[in-house]
Amino acid sequence: EAGVTQFPSHSVIEKGQTVTLRCDPISGHDNLYWYRRVMGKEIKFLLHFVKESKQDESGMPNNRFLAERTGGTYSTLKVQPAELEDSGVYFCASSLFRATGELFFGEGSRLTVL
Amino acid sequence: DQQVKQNSPSLSVQEGRISILNCDYTNSMFDYFLWYKKYPAEGPTFLISISSIKDKNEDGRFTVFLNKSAKHLSLHIVPSQAGDSAVYFCAASAQGGGGADGLTFGKGTHLIIQP
């Protein structure tokens, strides 16, 4: 069975440009999460989808970040316009049940903003 | 304000010995704790977890201990093997509500197993 897949694996853009990251969760997993790790720091929660609904977006840094999960399958995270401090690795994770807390992570999308 | 703290950025242990990774938390709403392991250029993978109603959970070479009064947990790996070299993240969640849906992670500890 395929795991969580993320695209692109690495994106280099200039400040002010737009980037869209995509995540395909494990098939059948209703719960989809986005996390971000800035260099050397902790992995931080951004938001949580249950199917196509945003359950919790309390971790989203600001309104330059927009996440969608149309149809409850794959999800996209758009950063527009990108700033230098947005650089980091963006992880997507999915799970069948929320309660256990055990998440299956993708390999991450590394974003570098110059 | 970090709610989950891993105060050792790195730890070096000889192969065959015990590795002990520590984690402290401040939020008393946390009731479920997990350890994830991460290799370079890969996503974190789940290792072991423990509910706050327990003080120990064991899975093969891995044991997690929870001391609720001290708000401290530790991961023991016995015996340590070369393939255990990785970054280990401690994470916590408030299953009973009262917090964000996601896991709260520490900064990680880089475990290096020496031959």
Image: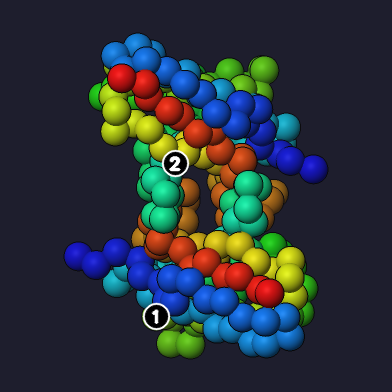
Q: Tell me residue A70's x, y (percent).
A: 48, 87
Residue at the extreme left of the image, as rendered? A1
Please tell me which residue is depicted at 38% across the width and 33% down the height of the picture: B85
Q: Is residue B1 visible?
A: yes
In screen coordinates, is B78 left or right of A114? left
Q: Is residue A57 visible?
A: no
Residue under label 2: B36
Residue under label 1: A73
Where, quadrant-wise, is the N terminus of chain A in this rendering?
bottom left
Q: Tell me residue A29's x, y (percent).
A: 36, 67
Q: Tell me residue B99's x, y (percent).
A: 68, 51
In screen coordinates, is B1 left or right of B19? right
Q: CA distance from mark 2 to mark 1?
A: 25 Å
Where, quadrant-wise, is the C terminus of chain A in this rendering?
bottom right
Residue at the extreme right of the image, as rendered? B1
Please tell me which residue is depicted at 64% across the width and 87% down the height of the picture: A18
What amino acid is at disc 2?
Tyr
Please tell me which residue is depicted at 29% across the width and 28% down the height of the picture: B82
Check the residue under mark 1 and report the chain it is in: A
Q: Mark 2 and mark 1 in contact? Answer it, CB < 8 Å.
A: no
Q: Tell me residue B66's x, y (percent).
A: 53, 22
What amino acid is at disc 1?
Thr
Dot 2: few (<14), some (14–19), or many (≥20) neighbours within 10 Å?
A: many
Between B80 and A4, the one lying in front of the other is B80
Please tell me which residue is depicted at 28% across the width and 24% down the height of the picture: B81
